[in-house]
Amino acid sequence: MAAMWTFALARLAGILLLGLCVGLLIGPIWLWVLVSACLYLGWQLLTLYRLDRWLRLRSQIDPPNLGGIWGDIVAQVVRLHRRKQFHKQRLIQLFRELRRSTAALPDGVIILSPQREIVWFNRQAARLLGLRRPVDVGLRIDNLIRSPEFVLYLHGDDFAMPLVIRPPVPLDLYLALQMVPYGGGQSLLLVRDVTRQMRLEAMRKDFVANASHELRTPLTVISGYLDTLADDSSIDPAWSGPIRDMRAQAQRMNAIIADLLELSRLESTDGEAPRDAIDVPSMLERLQRDALASADRPRQVVLELESADGLFGAAHELESAFTNLLVNGMKYTPAEGTVRMRWWADGEGAYFSVIDSGIGIPAEHIPRLTERFYRVDAGRSRGQGGSGLGLAIVKHALQRHGGWLDVQSVEGKGSTFTCRFPQARIWKQDVRTAQSA
């Protein structure tokens, strides 16, 4: 490059020197030097015009055959153009591969802008949600999926679990939607057809509910006969032990069926719980009295009432949830331990906690505690009469009241189960009313 500029400067100096020599011979000198400079400038302008014309029409004409510095510039432009074409073709190929791969995905994929506007979607997303290209591109996704649950999910900040909804198109489908944030505020919305799983789940729930109803009557009959045999003094004493064991197992099966029926009722009930006024402090005092009357209980069962407020909801559902948490804490707390119940409220909502000094729960088990029939230690739970349904009942009862369950535990040091209720569910009571109740 430096050689080219040296050559160009030498050419300019040669032309000016030639004009100077002609001026010395036939004069005047300044005129011939000016003429030489103008000729050189005209040639440069002509070359620049040819270069500009080629740059504007380079897809139609060949590059000009220029020498010197202009030829080097043309060569560099050609190289840059070829490099750009190579990268352009490569990007086009990658984009086509991306489109083909996303089109082949069994799940729908939608790219959303930071304003939740549709940037792009694949064919599966169009089929599942009824989207149309290019009409729906640029529209907000919550204007097309008109579901209150989806709007709350979209404007939240917890996308760890997918949201299952019915789509707005006239198809008998269940869709699982999950947001995956990436880049500068953009997001991927993954859409999956979970109709088969939801139907299997509904069939399973119906089977469990029907089987529980059918088993209840024969178990009641069996339990009645066993109670009669246990009280019959004419029975051979050798049968006392087996009859006692059969009665215990029949009672355990009755408890499991009762839990299954309660869980099925909660799962099949749509909408929120009713808004009956419930005196929670009185309910908890009654639960404490029942716990203290139990033979198999820890040394201390303490109740801490820090608020006189109650709740709007279904009394039997909340009592079932609180009882399950209390029984659960007592079951896994040693005889010399302590179980504390705590009720309080603040500006964000109301809370009920059961704090035990029991064996604790390993961290890897906590996310699955509310699954039905899930046990941290199956052998230990069966030995203590656990059905694995109590926390599932608690979860569904709280969901019906707009609340949720928080579990904190340290293995070997105890656990804390906290029911959290929104502000809208609090029934404000004055202290005198609570005390008189």
Image (cartoon, grey):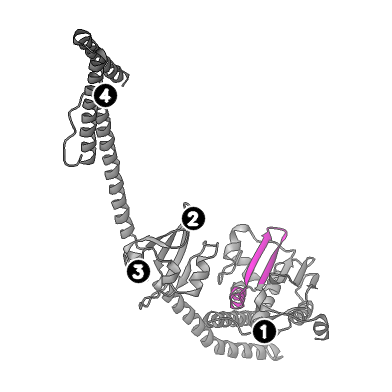
Element class at badge 4: helix
State the image quarter where residue 29 is shown: top left
Q: Indicate whether 222 appears above or below 296.
A: below
Dot 4 amino acid type: Ile
Q: Quadrant of the N terminus?
A: top left
The spot of residue 20 in percent (x, y) is 24, 12
Residue 151 falls left or right of residue 96: right
Q: Residue 315 bears which disc, if any?
A: 1
Q: Position of residue 21 (x, y in %)?
A: 22, 9
**Mark positioned earlier in the residue sequence (2 or 1):** 2
Q: Residue at x 34, y 61 (%)?
A: 122
- Judging by the rendered image, the residue that carries numbered circle 4 is 69
> Distance from label 4 to label 2 (Cα)?
48 Å
- Look at mark 2 in the image and give the residue it sits on: 185
The residues bearing labels 1 and 3 have C-alpha atoms spaced at a distance of: 45 Å
Nearer the viewer's eye, disc 4 or disc 2? 4
State whether residue 238 appears in this view: no
Precedes in sequence: disc 3 or disc 2: 3
Q: CA distance from mark 1 to mark 4?
A: 92 Å
Callout count: 4
Name which quarter of the figure residue 53 lies in: top left
